Amino acid sequence: MKLNKKLLSTFMICAMSLSLVACGGADEPEVVPNTPAVDAPVSLEDPPPMPQENNQTPQVSQEPLEPFVNDPDATASTNIYNAMLHGVEVTPMIADLEEQLFFDMYKIEPSYLSEYKVVAPTMTGQITEIGVFVVSDYANLPEVTEQVQARLAHIKDEGAFYPSHVEIANEAQVLVYGNIIALVVDPAVEQIVDNFETYFSIN
């Protein structure tokens, strides 16, 4: 009988312990995993609108350029040169070649030209060179053209010191219209060539 009482006491103690554990567990708050919120995916094909001030396109003036007008007091080569650069921004670091320097650089027989105008860089770091040559006799046109092309080849081989200059030299052009030859070495070669062609289409 004594043994049964001991077993009963042990059983009651265990039951009370389990009851206390259960009650204590009921008071503890439920643990919820702290999972960070994930934003809804944004479609690349439908980006959010930009603020109004960033959506405005800069206004570019569309005013047409007034047509070039010949200066009656200027030489033919000067008028052609000015027409070629009409509306074109070129470096200010260029100037007309002096006569002796011109013939040394181009090696053209002086008697083959009735007039000319050539501008070249006044300092290193520039490559712009633009020339207009009026050939006095059509018979000499091929030779003068060859000399102008030789000058361009020299610029490509020895005058282009920087990668950007190499690109400009490679895009340079020698133009011929009638007895007029033009050399264009400049970043704006396309616009200058267009101006040259436009000038002769209306004159």
Image (cartoon, helix red, strand yellow):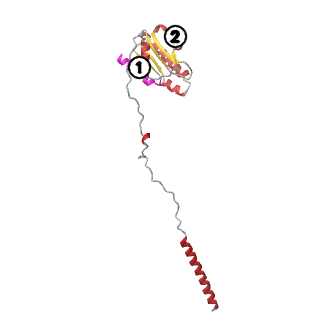
Whichever of callouts 1 and 2 sits on the residue coming sooner in the sequence is 2
**Residue 183 point in image, percent of width and height:** 46, 18
The residue singled out by tag 2 in the image is: 99
Q: The magenta stretch spans which residues?
A: 187-203
Looking at the rendered structure, the secondary structure element under dot 1 is helix
Is residue 154 toward the left or the right of residue 5 in the image?
Answer: left
Quadrant location of the N terminus?
bottom right
**Residue 106 point in image, percent of width and height:** 51, 14
Q: Residue furthest left?
A: 202
Is residue 201 toward the left or the right of residue 7 in the image?
Answer: left
**Residue 118 point in image, percent of width and height:** 48, 15
Give the vertical position of 78 relative to 59 (above or below): above
Q: At 63% across and 87% down in the image, what residue appears?
A: 6
Residue 190 falls inside the magenta stretch: yes
Give the vertical position of 38 relative to 135 (above or below): below
The residue singled out by tag 1 in the image is: 196
Predominant secondary structure in magenta? helix
- In this view, the residue in front, 94 or 202, is 94
- In this view, the residue in front, 185 or 71, is 71
- In this view, the residue in front, 3 or 56, is 56
Q: Are marks 1 and 2 in contact (CB under 8 Å)?
A: no
Type of amino acid at the residue the image marks with label 1: Phe
Crowd rating for badge 1 (residues with CA inside 10 Å; few <14, some 14–19, many 20+): many
Quadrant location of the C terminus?
top left
**Residue 46 point in image, percent of width and height:** 41, 47
Residue 90 falls inside the magenta stretch: no
Q: Residue furthest bottom?
A: 1
Q: Quadrant of residue 51?
A: top left
Q: Alpha-carbon distance for marks 1 and 2?
A: 24 Å
Disc marking residue 154: none
Looking at the rendered structure, the secondary structure element under dot 2 is helix
Type of amino acid at the residue the image marks with label 2: Glu
